[in-house]
Image (tube, rainbow, N blue to C red):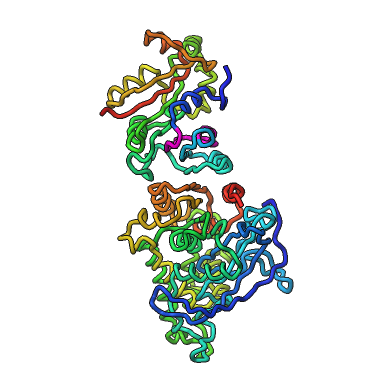
Amino acid sequence: MTHTLGRPDFDIISAWIEPGHRVLDLGCGDGTLLKHLIDTRGVHGVGVDVDDANILAAIKNGINVLQGNLEKGLDEFTDQSFDHVVLSRTLQTVRHTEGILREMLRVGREAVVSFPNFAYWKNLRSVLDGRMPVSEDLPYQWYDSPNVRFFTLLDFEALCAQMGLIIRERHVLDEGGNMVDKDDERELNFLGSLAVYRLTRSR
Amino acid sequence: MPGQSVGVVTSHRAHFDQPLHLRSGSVLPAYDLVYETYGTLNAAKSNAILVCHALSGHHHVAGHYADAPDNIGWWDNIVGPGRPLDTDRYFIVGLNNLGGCHGSTGPSSINPATGKRWGADFPIVAVSDWVEAQARLADLLGIDAWAAVIGGSLGGMQALRWTISQPERVRNAIVIASAPKLTAQNIAFNDVARQAILTDPDFHGGHYYEHNTRPTRGLRLARMLGHITYLSDDQMGEKFGRELRNGSFSFDYDVEFEVESYLRYQGDKFAGYFDANTYLLMTKALDYFDPARLDGGDLTKAMARSKPNTGFLIASFTTDWRFSPARSKEIVAALLANNRNVSYAEIDLNFGHDSFLMDDAHYHGVVDAYLRNIKL
């Protein structure tokens, strides 16, 4: 399966965003997703990233980007100033998990979160074989990984329930970026390498 | 740094007869501005960039003079063919602000009303007055709207002020190592500097020109103090540490530590060419700057006056404690609250406030990338 931006979660996220929406992309990298959304959907986009090279690349891409550390919150943004706040493949690198989720839904109407699923069967097999998993969605060696939180689909959903966050939509993908569709939650947790969620506050 | 210097440049002088009504209530009936330009204004007149100077800067931004090859512009490293302020693409304008001491009308100029130097009678000018004067220079040069106005420190305040005072005439503002207003600590540093000058016996109430003297002791102290606050603790430590000039303590009050030698040298050099009245005036312009003042201190409200499609690049430096990153972020937050197009870079450089003048690949890369995306 081919994906527009080489990232299957980007296709899913793009489909959720309507033309003209205001989108905040946390950990925006070089701004690829935002640029795509601006070009194809005419969104007003803002990115945040901590890394010098990403700031430079995003400015080169013509993206509004702010250098900042997500661990320190989103103080510079006012309440409900975005339609969507996106955190793609970044939640596992953030130490203050609850803090960032709370901030995302303070600043935005809807949070869009994608992350690698640690319970994916190949990851589990790797651990059973005695080695930490390295895969398409967990592409780092244990000693150079930016990831500080290792969690599963079910872990994440339990946290959402605990925080009173509503899961509006969920897509689970295998390592090839293909949609996994199972009714059994445990099976899904076993077969999904990457998950993408739409979250809102309870109302 | 890739790219080249603009090479030989010349400065120009423009005379303005239309009275300038200043923020203070005073009126300047006529005045001169000296300026330099680099590159060529395109037919659409859409490629002009205004460079605003900080406390001690002037119109000689880049290049050198044919008869003074060592007199290189204060921001030469960022201006020229292939450099971020690319003279192959942009028409760059630098001027000496009103109240300056490098050729534009200021306290050391002759007051036509008296035939003597203005001295202390020269009215205090505010950042908004500078923007008004700069707009008149733009008129003279046939520039309706700047592609960008850029400045560091006090220069950044002018760039920010442009977007509020003349929103139709600035398409992008690049605000570096600046702040939406000074803190009490910052004003305090400025006041110590002013006190050094004002209490110098050679100051003569600002009319020292008539006494054929200059308050160099005060100006020297003011500069030494300022200089400390423009550097970072780490950088001073690395550069000077506790090095002694003669290797051992001499148990007297002469220059012993290298840092003393450096500061005294810097102070002497500055006091040798800069005008004390201009120094006083520039520090006051810094202290008064507060574009949100008339909006009850609400910067978001003040920035709402900027045009929705004006672009902003805000940059700060991690080691700058005089204009810290937190101050730049206040500007960013006010722009975000107004849905303005803004990018913010927090640059990790070790040179404190002076970082904005340094030639650093990442810093210049950010400015370069931003400027290359401006459509002319």
Residue A32 on the magenta segment: yes
Residue found farthest to the right: B66
Residue A111 on the magenta segment: no
**How many numbered discs, if any?**
0
Asked if B290 appears above or below B365 in the picture, the reply is: below
Asked if A160 appears above or below A36 in the picture, the reply is: above
Which image quarter: residue B92?
bottom right
* Residue A176 image point, x, y percent: 54, 16
* Residue B23 image point, x, y percent: 40, 73
Which portion, as a residue range, is magenta?
A: A19-37
Asked if residue A199 shows in the view, the reply is yes
Asked if residue B58 shows in the view, the reply is no
Q: Residue at x 54, y 83 (%)?
A: B109
* Residue B130 image point, x, y percent: 49, 69
Q: Residue at x 44, y 83 (%)?
A: B120
Q: Residue at x 49, y 42 (%)?
A: A65
- Relative horizontal placement of residue B9, taking residue B186 as reference (left or right): right
Name the foreground residue: A200 vs B259.
A200
* Residue B234 image point, x, y percent: 50, 53
